[in-house]
Image: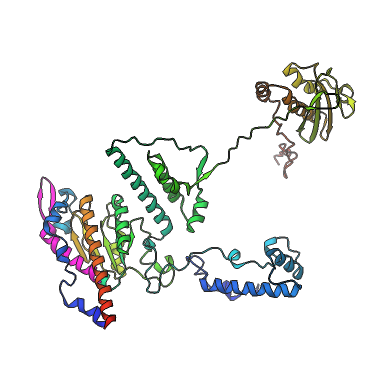
Amino acid sequence: DDRLLTEPLSHPDFFSVKDLFTLKDLFDARVHLGHKKGCRHRFMEPYIFGCRLDQDIIDLDQTVQHLQLALNFTAHVAYRGGIILFVSRKRQFCHLVESTARACGEYAHTRYWQGGLLTNSHVQFGPGVRLPDLLIFLSTLNNVFEPHVAIRDAAKVNIPTVGVVDTNCNPCLITYPIPGNDDSPAAVELYCKLFRMTIIRAKDKRRQSEAIEKLR
Amino acid sequence: LRLICTTTTVQKKNVGASGPEKYTEAFIKKQIEEFNLGKRHLANMMGEDPETFTQEDIDRAIAYLFPSGLFDKQARPMMKHPTEVFPEQRKIQWGEDGRPFHFLFYTGKQSYYSLMHETYERFLNVQKHQDQLIAKDLPLQKEKRNLAGSRWLTKIELEEMLLEKLSDDDYLRFIQLLQKLVALPCADIEENYIQKFSKEVPVQLQKVVIEPLQYDERGVAFSTGEGKRKTARATAVVYDNGTGKITVNGTDILHYFPVLQDREQLLFPFQFLGRIGKHDMVCTVSGGGRSAQAGAIRLASAKALRSFVTEKEVEFMRQAGLLTVDPRVKERKKPGQEGSRRKFTWKKR
């Protein structure tokens, strides 16, 4: 059992997350398109490649690195049986995100975020709740274009976060930011597909390793 | 100093009351076992067969053994099955490893949001089907769904269905989504799903049944009618082939109603239909005053005349107000006032 948990940590890419996508896939899904120059957030400047006709273009090389780190992290969390919560406040992708979460066997929250969900969970849900071990943001902003409350709450409750940050978002409190487009349907579908594949891969690997351990 | 005697239960903070579940499954099971055991003991005490001891027998036995003069029925001692006593609650939502069962658990309102999710999925399904039909150039079915005879579930009914509190906004949103789904042309596919949330409204138009004419021994057609006005109740029997004679409580109307106004009231239905000299009437009336009795007989005779007359004339009578019960009754006197409306004389000082 100990070996099950420590073995993946010795490899840099135990779940071969690098094979899931290429830079070309990101480009075809229009992940590099950001918002206009006026919407740019100051802390996103390192991630921006340049500006073309007032529209910001996100540096896909950095995106690839960040995405690999993030997917690797989610795979490890899923391998260890952690609870993953998908968060997005974009109304167009609410159904997609919920279906992805259901397909993975994980959880989703694409609705109105009640204030004390993470910080006041014992009163909201009852004593003995288990909080999520990872929060994945498909869009870090809420409907009023302000940072989602869950980022700050997760940082308060020591829950790591993975988030897709667009050029108008604040990447500060997110542990594994993924600079990329969060508004195009193609981009969001790509992210959902990638997360789904990593989580399912990680869970399958866990089941295989447990089966092998049992046989011994 | 007033000594307030309280028990520890009152002083304990009610943490679990606002929580999702108060009673565990094991607790309910134990209560059910205790109830069944108690039922058998009670049957034994009453000298009856424990196997065939029904809930009514239990109620009678408890009322016999613990007589109580309390007015409130719910304050008296009672012994009911635990499923009736403890309201249906949601059980613990997560398994042994702590992972919740439902994928929308962390939203707080899992049943409501899963309902919205499912409804939206069906909406997308219908749209996809519609696109397929359009691609094949097939006509979209457009049978108008009869919306008049059905209504959506009320907020309380939905709350009972989901076992969860809803806000008004949530309920409105759900109804709007359902309406959007129903508005699509190909919504017939999801008819089963939609019917779970719609209820039949019983047709409230009660077709008033006009009784057919009856015939007495002499072969004369007659019909009866009942009427009321204020506190007066009257029954009238109208005979055909008559001379216009009207008898009230055994006496002629000239003797019973000396005032012209009352007799005019009695004659009004016949005058309206133009059948003044053609019918005989025998009526009985009780209660009320002079005017009220006249009004009651008028209504009774109009109702009786419906059987003699065509449907069109019945409609004319209804529009003339001959068939409507006059709802006016004496208004009650209120405290602080002299009568129902009259206030006491206002004195400046």
Which quarter of the image is occupied by the C terminus of chain B? top right
In the image, which residues are magenta? A47-76
Above/below status of B342 relative to A35: above
Above/below status of A25 relative to B303: below
| Image position of B234 (left or right of B2) | right
Name the spot of residue B163 as percent of width and height, x first.
Answer: 49, 59
Q: Identify the main secondary structure in magenta.
A: helix
Q: Can residue B127 be found in the magenta stretch?
A: no
| Image position of B204 (left or right of A4) | right
Q: Would you identify the image quadrant in which residue A210 lies?
A: bottom left
Q: Would you identify the image quadrant in which residue B203 lies?
A: top right
Residue B78 seen? yes
Q: Which of B20 and A49 is in front in this view?
A: B20
Q: Nearer the viewer, residue A169 or B306?
A: B306
Name the spot of residue B307 as percent of width and height, x first.
Answer: 73, 26
Q: Which of A60 and A213 is in front in this view?
A: A213
Q: Can residue A73 be found in the magenta stretch?
A: yes
Residue reaching furthest to the bottom: A216
Name the spot of residue B104 as percent of width and height, x first.
Answer: 37, 60
Which residue appears at 30% of the width and 68% of the height? A156
